[in-house]
Each structure stands twice: as structure tokens, then as C-alpha cells.
């Protein structure tokens, strides 16, 4: 289990970025409005993590589309070896209700940037 520690972007100047290697079992973080999650893949193969909030709703009304479920989590998609994905967490906030965990991310390196 790894808890992703946030790096604060408040104030001026540079700062050291906290990076956390994910273990694939109960990797967790706390969502704050305006935060950005960076997932880097230094492993030898592609990984496809899913971010799930334990309290995410199974019935979210989406105008012009209908009702969708966030309960199964947000599938980040494949992250190739040596690649990274940047996720503005506000864009997936419906998935981030309750205790948040990342599954299928063993070996990914995560950085959480808070405003």
C-alpha cells in the first residue's frame, strides 16, 4: 500500500516534487480541487490503471447523454513503458468521492500536485 503525498504549488519559486511508487494494492490519495495527478511508467511494459472513489455514484445525469455510472472507476487507459499521463483531477471529480484508490498501477510513479 502506498499513500501518494501531495506537493504544494502554493507560493513562489521552485520546490522538490514528491514522487511515490505504486504497489498495486490500495494505493491511495486525497483529492483537492485544482489538483493534478501525474502517472509515469518506468516499468518494462504498458500499464492500465483505474482510479476509483469508494463513494462514486452509479447514476450521474449527463445533459444530452443520459445517466452514467462512476462507480466502476475512471480507466486511465494504457500508459506505455517510459511514458506519462497528466490528469487534471477536477475533470474526473465525479469518480473521486469517498476513499480514493488506484488499481492495476504496480510500478507506476505518481506525483500529486496541489494548488
Image: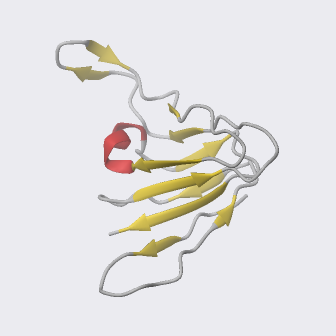
Q: How is the image coloured?
A: secondary structure
Quarter of the image with the N terminus is: bottom right
Please name the residue shown 51% across and 32% down the image. 73
Question: What percent of the width, then of the height, locates residue 43?
Answer: 78, 49
Q: How many marks?
A: 0
Residue 13 lies, with reference to residue 32, above or below; the image says: below
Quarter of the rendering containing residue 51: top right
Quarter of the image with the C terminus is: bottom left
Residue 90 lies, with reference to residue 61, above or below; the image says: below
Please name the residue shown 43% across and 66% down the image. 113
Whether residue 20 sits left or right of residue 7 in the image: it is right
Question: What percent of the width, then of the height, locates residue 57?
Answer: 38, 30
Q: Nearer the viewer, residue 87 or 45?
A: 45
Whether residue 90 sits left or right of residue 51 in the image: it is left
Question: What percent of the width, then of the height, locates residue 3?
Answer: 62, 63
Furthest-front residue in this view: 82
Question: What percent of the width, then of the height, locates residue 4?
Answer: 58, 64
Quarter of the rendering containing residue 36: bottom left
Furthest-left residue in this view: 63
Please name the residue shown 31% across and 48% down the image. 90
Furthest-right residue in this view: 44
Residue 99 lies, with reference to residue 63, above or below; the image says: below
Q: Nearer the viewer, residue 111 or 63?
A: 111
Amino acid at each position: 500500500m502506498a499513500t501518494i503525498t501531495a506537493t504544494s504549488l502554493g507560493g513562489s519559486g521552485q520546490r522538490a516534487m514528491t514522487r511515490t511508487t505504486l504497489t498495486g494494492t490500495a494505493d491511495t490519495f486525497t483529492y483537492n480541487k485544482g489538483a493534478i495527478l501525474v502517472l509515469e511508467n518506468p516499468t518494462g511494459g504498458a500499464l492500465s490503471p483505474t482510479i476509483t472513489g469508494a463513494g462514486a455514484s452509479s447514476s450521474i445525469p449527463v445533459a444530452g447523454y443520459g445517466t452514467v455510472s462512476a462507480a466502476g472507476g475512471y480507466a486511465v487507459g494504457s500508459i506505455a513503458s517510459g511514458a506519462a499521463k497528466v490528469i487534471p483531477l477536477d475533470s474526473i471529480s465525479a469518480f473521486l468521492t469517498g476513499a480514493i484508490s488506484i488499481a492495476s498501477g504496480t510500478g507506476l510513479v505518481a506525483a500529486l500536485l496541489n494548488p
